Image: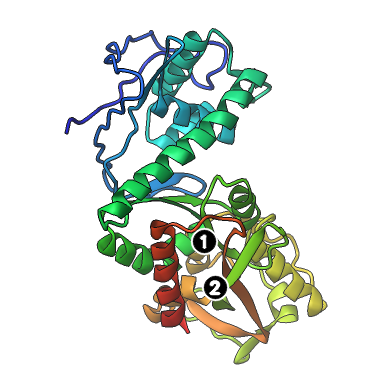
Amino acid sequence: MRSSTRSAGAPLRGRGDGQGVSEAKEPPAPRIEPGAVQTVARVHAPHHAPARTISKINCLDRYDQVFFDLFHVNIQLAHLQTLAAVARHGSFSRAARELRLTQPAVSMQVRQLEQELGLALLERVGKRTYTTKAGELLLAHAGRAMRELERGLELVQELRGIVAGRIRLGTSASFSIYLLPSALRRFRARYPKTELVVVTGNAPEMTRAVVANELDVGIVSLPVRERELVVTALHRDELVAIGPPGRRWPHSRATAAELAREPLILFEQGATLRRVIDEWFQRGGAVPALPMELGNTEAIKKLVESGLGLSVTSWFAAKAEVRARRLSAVKLAPPLFRQIGIVLRRDKPKTPVLDAFLGTLDDLRRSLA
C-alpha cells in the first residue's frame, strides 16, 4: 500500500486568515474509474493536542484519498474533510491545527474544491469564516456520504471478525489528561484496527457536537439538558481546595467564606466546573473578589504552586502534585462533588467499534468506583 504526503500550497485569497504565500501546484490526481476507491495509508506521529484541537490516536488504513468522478467533477475526500474543519472552527488557522496541516495547505485544498465546483464555498465576515449557501449544501450531503462510507468499511471489517472503524470522542482537556489515558491506552491495545479522534472543549461545546452527530461520544461534566442525549454516569469527582506546598490550613476543611478572603485562581467562566464552583460559593454566602481566571488546569496548578493564590479543582487533577508535595490540599465544607457522565445520541446506531469503546469506558467506571 502506498503512502501519501500532503503538500503545502497557496492560501485562499481573500478568505485565509494568515499571510499570503506564493502558489504551489500539487501533482495531478490519479485517474480513478467511477465507483473505484483508492486507499492510502497515513501515519501520524505522537502528538499532545492543546485544548479544543483534535489529536489522532493510532490510525486505521483509511480512505482519505478517495476520488469521485461524477459529472466530470474530481473531488478528494480529504479536501471535503478540510472544508468541514474550516466551517466548524470558522478559521483556517484553527482548522490547520486540528488537521495537522499548514495553513497554506488548508487554503489550497479549499481553493481546489471551489475551482472544481465553480462556486465560492466560504466567505469571510469580520474575523470569522462562514460557509456560503453552496458550501452549506455540499457539507450537508458530503457529511452523510462520508458517514455511510465509513459505516460500510466497518461492516466489511466486521465480516472478517475485526473490530475496526473510527470513534470521535469529545471531552474536556482535563479529562483527557487526568482521567482517560489508561482507558484510551487499553482501547488502542485491544483494537489496533480502530482510529480514535479526541476533541477537547467545554461541556456545552461537546454536547452540542454530539447532538449534531459531529462526535460519537462525549465525556462531560453533568448535568446536560439536551433531550436528544442518553446519559450514563461515569465518575463522581470530589473537588478540593489547593494551595502552595507547605501551606498551613486553619481547619481540616475549607469553607467558602475562608477561601473568598484569599486571592483565588479559578477556571474560566463558561465551563461547567466553574459554574459548580460558583454555586458552591453562593450557597456558602460568599463571593470571591475578582479571581484570576484561566482556561487550563495545568496553568492554574503552576500559579498556585508559585504562591500566587489558592484554587478549587478536581482531586484527580491535583493528587499527583499533592502526593509529590508540590501542592497542598484540603477538602471543602460542605463537600463538593461533580458528576462526570458519558453522553451519546439516543438514536445512535450501535456498531462493533462503538460497543467496544463503551465497554472500555464501563471498565474505567468500575475501576474508579
- Mark 1 is surrounded, within 10 Å at the Cα level, by few (under 14), some (14 to 19) or many (20 or more) other residues, namely some
- Image-quadrant location for residue 226: bottom right
Residue located farthest toward the bottom when viewing the structure as drawn? 252
Badge 1 is on which residue? 297
The answer to which of marks 2 and 1 sits earlier in the sequence is: 1
Q: Quadrant of residue 108?
A: top left
Q: From the viewer's perspective, tell me whether residue 92 is left or right of residue 321.
A: right
Q: How many marks?
A: 2
Position of residue 214 in the picture relative to residue 162 (left or right): right
Say if mark 2 contacts mark 1, CB within 8 Å: yes
Residue 314 is tagged as 2
Give the Cα separation between the discs numbered 2 and 1. Answer: 9 Å
Asked whether the viewer can see residue 62, the reply is yes
Quadrant in which the N terminus appears:
top left
Of residue 59 and residue 277, the one placed in the foreground of this image is 59
What x and y, as percent, mark residue 132? 65, 20
Q: Position of residue 204 (x, y in %)?
A: 66, 54
